[in-house]
Amino acid sequence: MDPLTEKQRKVLEFLEGRLAEGRPPSQRQIAAHFHLAQNAVFQLITYLKQKNYLTDIGGHRGLRLSDEYLRQKTRPGLPIIGTVAAGRPILAEENIEGYIDPGSLFKPAKGDFLLKVAGDSMIDDGILDGDLVAVRPTPQIRPGRIAVVLIDDDATVKRVFPEPGQITLKPANRLAGYKPQSFKLPADNIRIIGEVVACLRTNIDGGPL
């Protein structure tokens, strides 16, 4: 499933809460809750339906959580993402290699999926080859935050520095001498998938746990 913007996420969370209480809201009530114009709420709802988080059964209060989103929420733990193909949602079934329950290591709400790290470009930031990073989907990143970025067919983990007209990805391995990469924007072959919010170590001294 495609990642959500912060506003889309907040509207979805509000809807989930009201539906759990058995009080599905109208779009007018959503607009009043967030102090937004109704046409802005209509657009947010449209995006949530297009991204398959919501469905509409008709009527004044017909918004419901989609079957796809409900299946994702009831799966055991967080999905582990392997190879990611360009142009496909990162949570597409063909990208998911399995699931893991992180337990009390970090709050499930902090990340929506886990991504396997390949390579040593971020070891100075404590992210090693073979680690699993928890990712919170978002298309926008504050400068200097660690993020997952999709470049062509490859997902990479780097510190991200967005600027007007370009984006720079900086590695963290001084000994290896890796250089930052800069890309002009807009570009069809690069997009931010989400922010890295936690790291789960899977290897100790090169050996599996």
Image (cartoon, helix red, strand yellow):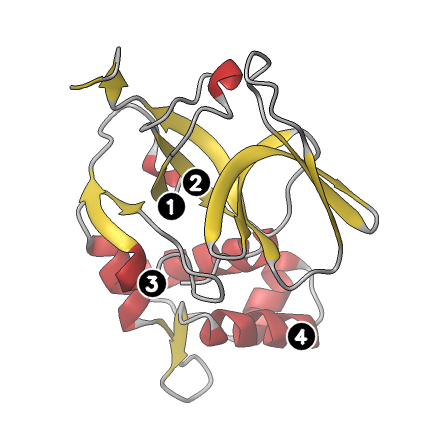
How busy is the neighbourhood of tag 2: few (under 14 within 10 Å), some, or many (20 plus)? many
Viewer-nearest of labels 3 and 2? 3
Badge 3 element: loop
Residue 43 quadrant: bottom right
Taking depth in this image into account, of 173 and 4 the one nearest to the observer is: 173
User: Mark 2 highlights which residue?
Assistant: 135
Amino acid beneath label 4: Gln
Viewer-nearest of labels 3 and 4? 3
At which x and y percent is residue 136?
Answer: 46, 43
User: Mark 1 highlights which residue?
Assistant: 112
At which x and y percent is residue 84?
Answer: 39, 54
Q: Are marks 3 and 4 in contact (CB under 8 Å)?
A: no
User: Mark 4 highlights which residue?
Assistant: 38
Amino acid beneath label 3: Ala
Badge 1 element: loop
Earlier-in-chain disc, 3 versus 1: 3
Earlier-in-chain disc, 3 versus 2: 3
Looking at the rendering, in which quadrant would you find the C terminus? Answer: top left
